[in-house]
Image: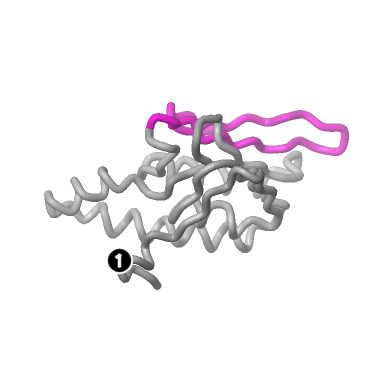
Amino acid sequence: MYTIPEISFEEISGRDGNVGLITLTRPQALNALNYMMLNALSNQLDEWEAANHIKAVVIRSGGGRAFCAGGDVRNAYEHKMSGDPALSLFFRDEYRLNRHIHHYLKPYIALIDGIVMGGGVGISIHASHRIATDRIDFAMPETGIGFFS
């Protein structure tokens, strides 16, 4: 199982199989996705998709004001200013992850509460099942700056 401080993974035992539980745990940054989080999420989804004992996956936030405020803009800006090519890899891998979630072979359930923007939309809206609270604040700011694919 992949472990980093910003995202946790656990398996919840059930009668007919286990549920893989993903919790975004970066509330100080509104659970904004950085590249390590993106890679950990992708790798864990691959592992659970191949595991016969996992019957479904649930993604949620660990509390706070946001499910996920998208990509880590501050980090992206720093990569852009330094000329680091990792920025293009982030977007490439983010979109691959969104596609993987859309075609995931098991139920992928997004529990959406609070702010959900950009990359947070990607990891939730492509789920096979979405459950949103009445506190959802949904936005795609990329369209306001002319960024779309």
Q: How many dots with numbers? A: 1
Q: Position of residue 60 (x, y in %)?
A: 60, 39
Identify the amino acid type marked 1.
Answer: Ile
Q: Residues within 10 Å of mark 1 (few under 14, many from 20)?
A: few
Residue 47 shows up from this direction? no
In the foreground, 149 or 132:
132
Q: Position of residue 149 (x, y in %)?
A: 40, 73
Q: Position of residue 70 (x, y in %)?
A: 42, 49
Q: Residue at x 59, y 58 (%)?
A: 125
Q: Is residue 3 left or right of residue 146?
A: right
In the displayed structure, 100 sits above or below 69; it is below
Magenta residues, start to end? 1-28
Residue found farthest to the left: 82
In the foreground, 74 or 39:
74
Quarter assignment of residue 80? bottom left
Q: Is residue 35 left or right of residue 42?
A: left
Q: Which residue is mark 1?
A: 145
Q: Position of residue 41 (x, y in %)?
A: 50, 43
Q: Residue at x 13, y 51 (%)?
A: 81
Q: Residue at x 21, y 56 (%)?
A: 85
Residue 78 shows up from this direction? yes
